[in-house]
Amino acid sequence: MRAFPARTIWLALTAGLMGLTLWLIFIWVPTESNLGEVQRALYFHVPVAILALGAIVLVAIGSVGFLITNRPRWDWFAHASAETGVVVGALALITGSIWARPIWNVWWTWDAKLTTTLILWFIFIGYLMLRAYAPPGRQGARLAAILGVIGAIDAPIIYYAADLWRTAHPGRVTGPGADGSLESEMLLTLLVSSIAVFSAFAYMLVERYRVRKSEADVIELGRRIQMAHSEVSGPATGALKAMSKG
Amino acid sequence: MGKYLSACVLAAAMLSIATVALAAGEQAGAMAGSITSQKNTNTSTNLGYLFAVYIVTWAGFFAYLFLVSRRQKEIEKELSRLRERLGEESSSPAKRT
């Protein structure tokens, strides 16, 4: 019998956990009395919003690691975190917007929390655009690392936006400084849901890191082939080729 | 990897339909026994928004995972092709002499 790789087991466990989350959210947890059924969106929206903040912190950690050690694996990690950050950031914005429609009667408002989260999403996009258009190699990676570190300044601003500005967005329900207004059943559901979503995020991050590493392997192999080819053909053959082109 | 992912997507889709159908059924039952129709109509409308939030989250995760795993497959093919080519280059007669 073929043994399942660890990643397949991880994916299956995440899927199972997500199934449990569904049951908790839609069947088990009581309905919030003021907001009604749509409040159940909290169990998806809050974990992805936390992950969007977490992703920029991971980008900053990877960037600082790269700037200090100059090792490419830190850069791959920062790059993978930025790309997964785009996904969870987009999910946080979209799910928040869908939730806002029945509660605030608008899809979007320039509220402090929403606006700073949108800025975070643009920081991720800016980081990836810089990676795409900057010179290849270490110079581009260094520029992106600097952007990654500066971009992380937005994380505490988002977290404390409700304290810093007058905002329509509800206060924090978990984490430091939270008002702790959730019922124990709601808190448990949010915890299980967060574990499921965090596990899915970690899986995506690992997969994206592997892709980034493989891309680096392809570049390295291509370079070695070029070197081997130039050794085989020699300078005379190269000159002949140049002449034939001329 | 691809078939496991497909199985997970299929399971998630089936589970989502079943769960939301169950939740909607409970809502319909509650509405039938209720006097205030206005509040229940709003709740029913909100269920659509809730469904949208849920679908977007799952679709986002799985679409991204699908794209990443496809990219990984392409790169692995490219890697094996390059390794073969490197083997040919290093074992060619010109290289040996």
Image: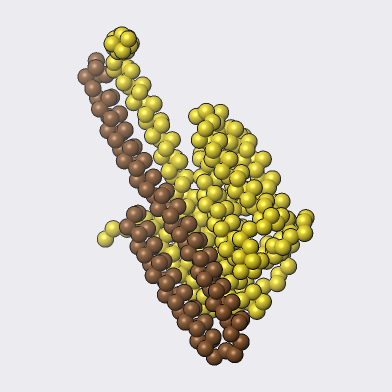
Q: Colour of chain A?
A: yellow
Residue farthest along the left direction in this orientation: B93
- Identified at 52% across, 28% down, the residue is A135
In-image side of A129 versus A176 (left or right): left
In-image side of A224 versus A178 (left or right): left
The relative height of residue A82 versus residue B51 in the rendered view (above or below) is above
Which corner quadrant of the image does residue A38 belong to? Answer: bottom right
Residue farthest along the front direction in this orientation: B38
x, y percent for residue B86? 30, 29
- Identified at 57% across, 89% down, the residue is B34
Letter of the brown chain: B
In-image side of A145 versus A231 (left or right): right
- Identified at 68% across, 47% down, the residue is A154
Which corner quadrant of the image does residue B50 belong to? Answer: bottom right
For the C terminus of chain B, give its image quadrant.
Answer: top left
- Let me know if residue A47 appears in the view: no
Q: How is the image coloured?
A: by chain
Along the viewing direction, whichever of B8 and A73 lies nearer the viewer: B8
